[in-house]
Image: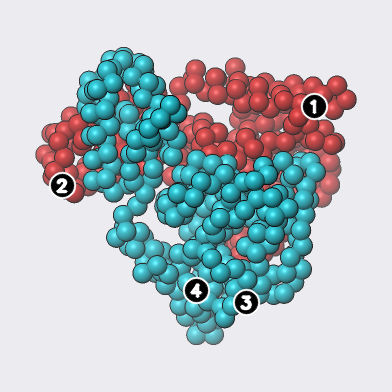
Chain colours: A cyan, B red
Amino acid sequence: MERLNRKERVAAILKILSDNPNKVISLSYFQENFNMARSTLSEDVTILKKVVEDIGVGSVETVAGPTGGVKFVAGIKEEEKERFLLELCESLKNPDRIMPGGFLYTNDLIFSPDITNKLGIIFASYFKDKDIDYVLTVETKGIPIAMMTARYLNVPLVIVRRENKVTEGPTVSINYVSGSTKKIQTMCLSKRAVKRGSNVIFIDDFMRGGGTASGIIKLMEEFESKVVGIGVLIEVKTERKLVQDYVSLLSLEKVDEENQIINIYPRIL
Amino acid sequence: MERLNRKERVAAILKILSDNPNKVISLSYFQENFNMARSTLSEDVTILKKVVEDIGVGSVETVAGPTGGVKFVAGIKEEEKERFLLELCESLKNPDRIMPGGFLYTNDLIFSPDITNKLGIIFASYFKDKDIDYVLTVETKGIPIAMMTARYLNVPLVIVRRENKVTEGPTVSINYVSGSTKKIQTMCLSKRAVKRGSNVIFIDDFMRGGGTASGIIKLMEEFESKVVGIGVLIEVKTERKLVQDYVSLLSLEKVDEENQIINIYPRIL
């Protein structure tokens, strides 16, 4: 890399940190690549802390110790989060989304990179202090949101399957009862997907009775691992859920197919 | 936002552009938010072009005209791409990955955010000039890579399902013959997922006979849309494929279960 002047270098360092969210990058990496003194780098980091806070996209944090350095942690301002979730609700209230059977079509939103990316940042910021080893999801619709959450936490994504696949080698399967339909369902996970003694979070797009989430907790017991957080985008308001401790961003109160009315609102406001 | 000085502002503008890959942001957005003159902004953009090129993470491009502005396009240097793909091959050659039946376990790699993110940048840079409307994939394993590709192209992801789902409303289904096993397979897509007259690319983790890719081309005909690009991470070396025009990053020549040998190499070197 050629020698950059200060304003170029500050931008370059932020770009590198921000491309590697939640990853500690050693100070010597920057010193060597930008050919700069430690004291100058410290000043640059101070500038970056201010910039990131000022535009409200997270924080730049200094990590002390031998494996220390500096890292970017993605975040979102409270008012920006509220605005975003309210907009999402407005879009979800469109009666055009009601499918036969009272289901809600959401794919265009939850697979839209802008939205998926913001949801990843929001979920990651709920769980960032929990020392997570993996982000789990069950195929299929929650995968994009879970992938973005994994990216901002900088941990691997694990996709639990609905049936056994030859490409995954020996698997652990469990049966569980769906919270809403009371049907027996299966989930399978490759034995090598999760190391014993891990902390995982479960991320999904939708929760009705909580059967899937509760199934994931049982599945993780088979891996001697622990679900330390559950995050869902939309929860359906029900009398009782099979799990108690979870974060949901939106609450779906009613889909009235006859009168074409959808009641949904941000949960956290 | 409080008034930032120049080095802070340059970093802030790059962060905002880089958080919105392939999205044109108007110059007036920055002028208003950072309270700056057009001439100063032009100078800042010139600095950013140099920084981004220098650290090899893509380009900052100026778009002229009434809807014009400036955008960040993610990219990767050729030598960095080669290094990354060679490392990936080294990791894939580990005999521990051979599953009964000669399948290769790849989930830990293709679901690892660092790798998935780089693959998204690589695929996006192949197809960025093709005026893409959607990135398509078929559930399940290709979804994370396809999501990242969609993010860097700034277009929606569309997930084709293996069976009909009640949450997706009316669907179009097609049957197709697998290129390798010659089995009849089905794929389904919600009628509202793709607008008529769209250009799409198909992204997947694995291609054997090309049956799935060729199925996707047929499916898109039902939507009066066109597959203008196909990208797969690993292609299995076969005599003949059902599709000819595709990009593959790695070529899998042999998985020798008996002698525990995997031959795989980067395709583009």
Q: Is mark 1 on a helix, strand or loop?
A: strand
Q: Mark 1 points at which residue?
A: B255
**How far apart, in angstroms, are the residues tagged by discs 2 and 3?**
50 Å
Q: Distance between the residues labelled 4 and 3?
A: 15 Å
Disc nearer the start of the sequence (4/3): 3
Mark 2 and mark 3, same subunit?
A: no
Upstream in sequence: badge 1 or badge 2: 2
Mark seen at residue A236: none
At label 2, the amino acid type is: Glu
Q: Residue A252 carries which label?
A: 4
Q: Residues within 10 Å of mark 2 (few under 14, many from 20)?
A: few
Q: Quick check: marks 1 and 2 in contact, CB under 8 Å?
A: no
Q: How far apart are marks 3 and 1 (CA)?
A: 47 Å
- Measured as percent of width and height from the top left, residue B143 is found at 60, 46
Q: Nearer the viewer, mark 4 or mark 3?
A: 4
Q: Subunit of mark 2?
A: B
Tag 2 and tag 4 share a subunit: no
Residue at 51% across, 79% down: A254
Foreground tag (2 vs 3): 2
Instruction: Assign a secondary structure to mark 3.
Output: loop
Local packing at callout 1 (Cα closer than 10 Å; few below 14, some 14-19, many 20+) is many
Residue A73, image x and y in percent? Answer: 39, 43
Q: Which amino acid does label 4 sit on?
A: Leu
Name above or below for residue A239 compared with residue A233.
Answer: below
Examine the rendered structure and indicate whether residue B64 appears above or below residue B222: above
For label 3, the residue is A101
Circle 3 marks a residue in which chain?
A
Co-location on one chain, circles 1 and 2: yes
For the point 65% across and 64% down, the residue is A214
